[in-house]
Amino acid sequence: MTEQDVDDVAFLTGTNHRVTAPISHSICQSSPLIHNRDSGGVVGNESNSNQAKKSLYENHGVAACSHNKALCIATIVFAFLFTLAVIIAFTGPQSDCPCAGDIKSSYVDEKTNMTKTFEPRATNGQIFPWNNIRLPTSLKPHRYNLTIHPNLTTLEVRSQVSIEFQAEKDTNFMVLHCKNLTILDKIIQDRHGNNLTIIKMLEYIGGQQLYIEIREKFRKRHNYVLRIRYNFKLNTDSEGFYISSYTTKNGEKRYLATTHFEPTFARTAFPCFDEPQLKAKFRLTVFRDRFHISLFNTPIVKTDVLGFYMGTGLLYDEFLETNEISTYLVAFVICDFSQQNKQTESGVSVSIYTPEPFISRAPFTLDTASFFLDYYENFFGIAFPLPKLDIVALPEFDYGAMENWGLITYRETAIFSNTRDNETFITAHQWLITNIAHELAHQWFGNLVTMKWWNDYWLSEGFTTLFEYQGVDKYIPEWRMMEQFIIDKTQPALALDALACSHPVIANVTDPSEIDAIFDTISLSKGTAILYMLANFLQNENLENGLNDYLSTYKYQNAEMKDLWNVLGKNTNQSLDIKTIMDTWTNQMGFPLVIIKRENHTIIASQRRFLVTVERGNTTYHTLPISGYNYKWHIPLTYYTDNNSEIKHVLMNMTEAKFEVDDIKWIKANVNQTGFYRVTYDDDIWAALISTLKTDHKAFSAADRASLIDDAFSLSRAGVLNVSVALELSLYLKNEREYAPWATAIEHLKSWARRLSESLAYKAFLKYMRTLLTPVTKFIGWNKNKSHMEKLLRARVLSAAILCELNETISVAKTQFQNWMIQNKSIDPNLKEIIYSAGVKYGGINEWQYCWNYYKNSTSANEKQILLKALGVALDPWLLQRYLIETLDTSVVKPEDVKLVLEVVAANPEGRLLAWRHLKAYWPTMHSLYGNSTILMGNLISAVTAHLSTPYDLYEVSTYFNGMDVGSASRALEQSLEIIQLNINWVSQNAEEVNNWLRKNMK
């Protein structure tokens, strides 16, 4: 090992072999003290002066001089540094680059619309020369060589990185990303190993950017390398490179370090070009203790002993170089987890890593992952491009799952089951399978081909979500996943996109702080819903061929939305202009309401935007932006009629459509709710549809019955349809026995009950709900020997029965709760939420306390989630207030679970105002709890305010947040205020009508 290698090892291991002082961020000279892993030696040629410099840092090097001489030298050095600092402070960057030097507030560089309108200041007070949130396009990285040594005790991380890049044009500066890193040393070299002179380095905290300027120039098409040594601290929240822990069966707390870099957290672990289009290859070396293992996107190629002669006792792992990859997909983990492994049919090694207590539950996850890896290889027609796939279960992970290429991370609830038996939590069981399918689909969509910028995030996320449902539908057809798709994705997206403060699927992300906010229901659920509509319109063969062409064309590259539309259009022989069709769905907010009218044997289908409008005088609550498409859409309309069940297709090209039908009683449009639009009909067609539902509901598929329920209730919320029509339609539910219609209906019925909770109609409406639910609760019963879909149905209807006070259900549930509490009798896992909820809601302090203690002592993540939900349905406000206070202790309730607690308490009429007051009182605490994750703060606002429905509630929320900077949670706040106003209007306009209908029909 050379002396330079020893120097680098000393830095990375933290041994006291030599000391290096941090370099100023204002002026830095080139330094040779960077290790070149590729050559195994010292970077560049070591001059005599460098050797002399080295000797001053050696432990055995001694410098001797008199006291007076030392004082003189110190005075001269201080004077020189002071003079130099003054010169720097008043001199602009030495560059002829138009982006350097003084910048006016109106300055726009590279003619983008993303330029800020103020002058950014570096940490030393100077004007930061780059005035754009996006990086310049003058340099492109090719390779990162990263070495890290995390200390899991002190949380200190010592690191070095070399970034190989090419100049795309002549320039004398570079800008890259950097956040919370202490830079100790840096060198820039050309392809011949010659050091370039760094004359300026500035850091701009607001933009998370680092500016480095050289005296020479980066020449077009020439290659260079930037080498940086730095250190930082492991984060304590679930972002960047962070510390986590778990507890063994023996109560021992063990630590691990892991990463989450999406969307912009890679820059907190290493200086980088942290934008998705700047793909590069990565090589990693990890220094670790012997009792840990390290994981990376690729397999280990070498492990060796490091530093015994220095007393460190460390090992180091070197990993295979990756393919071109975006920084947000890089991942590494240092842990002491156990492993299980198997190979797929194509020879890919799949491994599960999890804490020892969970390893016995890993085989089912392993089998599922292997199935989907083979499935997607066949579906996409492209082999998985990596030699291995690791799946890691993390004890603390706010984001649930992350698709890092070759190293997928999940919250530990992912590893929970190894059977399909009746003892499994079916919802957790399904969550596991669908999430594995989702993250594996990302290995192609998002990883192999990546969006150029976050505006198109929905593209990879939308397709992978669609493939997730379709893949599981192939894997386990009896789960009827495409029916579940409309419940989980289409309907929630329709509800949110009907607000005036919605936004297009594509949003103009100009600042990293906005990226979190864009990952909302509109971007994700609407994105996948419109792709589902497109898939049905194109038919499977055209879609699969188009996707294969798209992935093959852009693999290891970045693509934009228009690239996908062009490829799909080619696979329809250019018979359809996919881009023109889809632009109306992605570039404007909202969606259409299709109005079906019948004139003799002609059906006229017209369209207008469906908007749940909130009136304030003569204006809407939210100013509607102008749409370049005038809020018209190319609609792939599908339909069938009572005398012809064949599904017909009509493309409405931003206009109305007319088509002939036979002598019909009714027409059902938007077959199986595959389209992202709502439909309303003439009164006589509505009457015929409702009559058919009452007499022969199976004339429609379960998805179509769900669609009719969803449209009727949503149209009544918007004032398009009288509430009595929705109520008349709901009467058929006495005969309904399938999951999708009931899941849809219960969501709307519960929403109505919450809005009516302070009106005269409330008790009568609960009675009506009991009337509808009684037949299905008797049908579904309590017997555990049910199919998967029957278990999902039972969970929905029995939970609703508990909430609406159905005595027969409450009695059985309370008995089972007492048997569990007093006699320690076991409960069917799929009935636990129902039974716990009944025990807490209709019990007292003893029942609540028993569940709380059980929660604190449980080691099952699924059990804890169920108990958190049940504890929030208590009727005693004192218990609810106590519960909310308990959530402030992060050692008892994990930060990622606080939203769930607030959500369930806010949905409880007894806790609605308590939840709001709690959020208001502890807003600063919540903000510090979630750090920079403003999307989670937005989720808290939405959860707590969703059911508020009085003018005073609106005044309270709007007044509290007035003038407050909530960052990218502002969209969630805006939506919440609009929803509260909607609730107020709906109650004032419909409560009396609902009460009259109930009095007439409930006699």
Image (cartoon, helix red, strand yellow):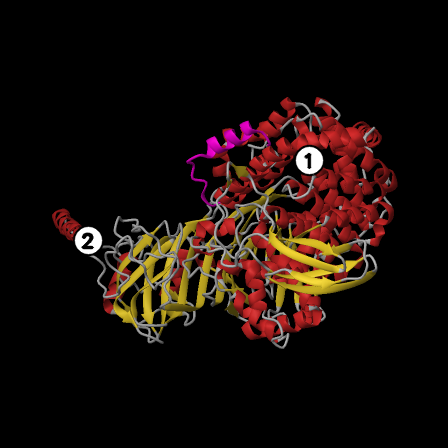
Q: How many marks?
A: 2
Regarding mark 2 in the picture, which secondary structure is present there? loop
Identify which residue is drawn at 63% across, 77% down. Answer: 573
The stretch of residues the image draws in magenta is: 949-968
Compare marks 1 and 2 and give the one earlier in the sequence. 2
Image location (x, y in percent) of residue 578? 59, 68
The residue pinned by badge 2 equals 64
The residue pinned by badge 1 equals 752
- The amino acid pointed to by label 2 is Ala
Image location (x, y in percent) of residue 989? 63, 33
Q: For residue 446, say whether it is visible.
A: no
- The amino acid pointed to by label 1 is Trp
Depth check: 377 or 19 in front? Answer: 377
Q: Taking 290 as reference, is 671 left or right?
A: right
Where is residue 718, by image quadrant?
top right
Separation of residues labelled 1 and 2 (CA atoms): 85 Å
Q: Taking 567 as reference, is 725 left or right?
A: right
